[in-house]
Amino acid sequence: MAQHAASSREPSRQDRPGYHDPLAGIGGAAPAQSALTLRLVLAVVGLVFATCGVIAFILIQAPTWVIVLFVLVGLTAVVDIIVVTRRKLRGESG
C-alpha cells in the first residue's frame, strides 16, 4: 500500500524538466544545442586559410617551418571536418 501511494505522488522538483533553472517557469533559458554545424564551418574556413597560406608561402619562398606550421593547421582542420561529418551522419543534431 505504501508503494502505491509513493508512485501516485506529485513528481519531486528534481523529476521535472528544468529543475536546475530557477527561472524555468518565467521564461528560462532555451535548451542547449550542439554547435556541430558551426564547428564544421570553422574547420572548412581554417582549411581554406591554411591552403592559401601554404600556397602564398611557397610562392614567396618562406622558411620551411612556416609551411610545416600551415600544413599542421590544415591537417587539424581536415581531421576536425572528418570527426564532425561522422557525428552529423550518425544523426547528432547541430
Image (cartoon, grey):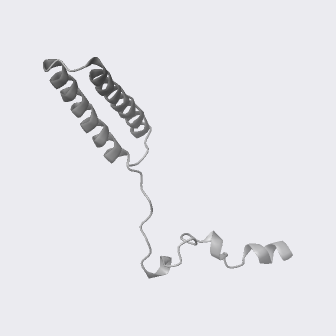
- Side of 81 relative to 18 (left or right): left
- Side of 55 relative to 17 (left or right): left
Residue lying furthest front: 63
Q: Is residue 27 above or below residue 59?
A: below
Which residue does the image show at 27% across and 22% down from the upper left?
67
Which residue does the image show at 19% across and 23% down from the upper left?
57
| Relative image position of residue 49 (x, y in whole percent) | 22, 33
Q: Is residue 1 visible?
A: no
Q: Is residue 88 above or below residue 51?
A: below
Q: Is residue 94 above or below residue 27?
A: above
State the residue in front, 27 or 2: 27
- Side of 13 relative to 45 (left or right): right
Residue lying furthest bottom: 26
| Relative image position of residue 66 (x, y in whole percent) | 28, 24
Residue lying furthest left: 59
| Relative image position of residue 73 (x, y in whole percent) | 33, 30
Asked which quadrant contains residue 91, the reply is top left
